[in-house]
Image: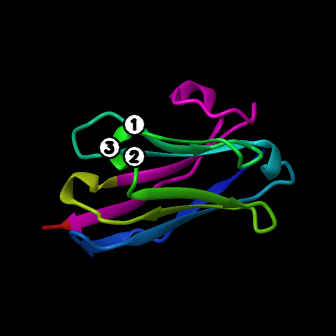
């Protein structure tokens, strides 16, 4: 069983940075692929970024490439999403997710564990 808790969301001005974190409980954190998803108001949940169990493979959705950076610290059981050059279109609830297979996937159904989400609001 893995529990995920996101922190770090908030209100930020357009063009600014924000880092959100996801702390995981459980002893198998280092074997999971981790990802960030987001759901904007009135929209479906979408994949944002993922990192493999080893940290060697990383994938971003085109909309955030060059602006967002996902990373993991297995010693702290934590995954991060550094978001730079934020724009109002990035406003959403951001969710952390863990996939037991260790391989990055954009498919929501492959992620077994989810956090409760943290809200990010970008003002123009």
Other residues around mark 3 within 10 Å, as few (<14) / some (14–19) / many (≥20):
few
Find disc 2 in the rendering and name its residue: 38
Alpha carbon distance from label 3 to label 2: 12 Å
Of marks 3 and 2, the one in the foreground: 3
Q: Is residue 121 above or below residue 89?
A: below
Q: Residue furthest left?
A: 124
Q: Which quarter of the rendered picture does the C terminus lie within?
A: bottom left
State how many labels appear.
3
Color encoding of the figure: rainbow
Find disc 1 in the rendering and name its residue: 46
Q: Quadrant of residue 84?
A: bottom left
Q: Pointer 3 and pointer 2: residues touching (CB < 8 Å)?
A: no
Q: Earlier in the sequence, mark 1 or mark 3?
A: 1
- Residue at 42%, 53% (x, y): give it: 94
Other residues around mark 1 within 10 Å, as few (<14) / some (14–19) / many (≥20):
some
How far across and down, in percent of the image, does residue 76 sit? 76, 68
Q: Which quarter of the rendered picture does the N terminus lie within?
A: top right
Q: Secondary structure at mark 1?
A: strand
- Residue at 78%, 51% (x, y): give it: 29
Find disc 3 in the rendering and name its residue: 63
Q: Pointer 2 and pointer 1: residues touching (CB < 8 Å)?
A: yes
In this rendering, would 12 be left or right of 25? Answer: left
Q: Earlier in the sequence, mark 3 or mark 2?
A: 2
Q: Which residues are magenta?
A: 93-122
How far across and down, in percent of the image, does residue 72 sit? 67, 59
């Amino acid at each position: 069983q893995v529990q995920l808790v996101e922190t770090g969301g908030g209100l930020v001005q357009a063009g600014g940075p924000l880092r959100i974190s996801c702390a995981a409980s459980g002893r198998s954190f280092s074997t999971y692929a981790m990802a960030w998803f987001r759901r904007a108001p009135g929209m479906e949940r979408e994949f944002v970024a993922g990192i493999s169990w080893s940290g060697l493979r990383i994938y971003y959705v085109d909309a955030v490439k060059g602006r967002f950076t996902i990373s993991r610290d297995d010693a702290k059981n934590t995954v991060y999403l550094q978001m730079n050059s934020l724009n109002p279109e990035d406003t959403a609830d951001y969710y952390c997710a863990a996939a037991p297979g260790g391989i990055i996937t954009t498919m929501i159904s492959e992620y077994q564990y989810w956090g409760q989400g943290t809200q990010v609001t970008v003002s123009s």
